[in-house]
């Protein structure tokens, strides 16, 4: 059995011992790109290669 560690304590699926108790996990790649002349950031998810863990986003999160 594979266990997924998670330290997001306000997630509905957060369990004892920092284990995720969700039936499944969905992780997406996110790349932030700045719009020129603007302070807005846009998430682009058409590239499936993350390159680093900080370029990923867990979308399984659900607030408690």
Image (cartoon, rainbow, N blue to C red):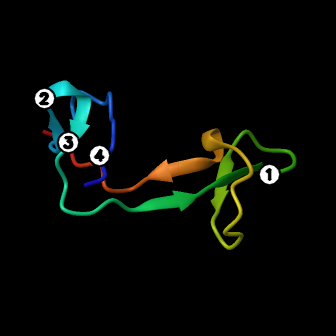
Q: On the rendered image, what quadrant is the C terminus found in?
A: top left
Specify which label sits upstream in the sequence, 4 or 2.
4
The picture places residue 7, in percent across and down from the top left corner, at 32, 27
- Measured in 3D between alpha carbons, the distance from the residue under mark 3 to the one under mark 4, in whole angstroms, is 20 Å
Q: Secondary structure at mark 2?
A: helix
- Measured in 3D between alpha carbons, the distance from the residue under mark 2 to the one under mark 3, in whole angstroms, is 16 Å
Where residue 53 is drawn, which disc sits there?
none
Q: Secondary structure at mark 4?
A: loop
Q: Residue furthest front?
A: 1
Q: Nearer the viewer, residue 64 or 54?
A: 54
Q: Which residue is mark 2?
A: 16
Q: Which residue is mark 4?
A: 3
The picture places residue 34, in percent across and down from the top left corner, at 78, 47
Q: Secondary structure at mark 3?
A: loop
Q: Nearer the viewer, mark 3 or mark 4?
A: 4
Q: On the rendered image, what quadrant is the N terminus found in?
A: bottom left
Name the quadrant containing residue 31. Answer: bottom right
Other residues around mark 4 within 10 Å, as few (<14) / some (14–19) / many (≥20): few
Other residues around mark 3 within 10 Å, as few (<14) / some (14–19) / many (≥20): few
Question: Is 24 displayed left or right of 57 in the figure?
Answer: left
Question: Is 57 displayed left or right of 47 in the figure?
Answer: left
Specify which label sits upstream in the sequence, 3 or 4.
4
Where residue 35 is drawn, which disc sits there?
1
- Measured in 3D between alpha carbons, the distance from the residue under mark 3 to the one under mark 1, in whole angstroms, is 30 Å
Q: Residue at x 17, y 45 (%)?
A: 13
Question: Is 28 displayed left or right of 33 in the figure?
Answer: left
Q: Secondary structure at mark 1?
A: loop
Q: Which residue is mark 3?
A: 63
Q: Residue furthest bottom?
A: 46
Q: Nearer the viewer, residue 11 or 2?
A: 2
Specify which label sits upstream in the sequence, 1 or 2.
2
């Amino acid at each position: 059995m594979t266990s997924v560690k998670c330290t997001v304590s306000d997630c509905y699926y957060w369990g004892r011992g920092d284990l995720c108790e969700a039936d499944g996990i969905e992780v997406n790649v996110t790349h932030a790109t700045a719009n020129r002349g603007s302070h807005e950031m846009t998430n682009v998810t058409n590239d499936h290669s993350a390159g680093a863990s900080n370029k990923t986003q867990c979308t399984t999160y659900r607030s408690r």
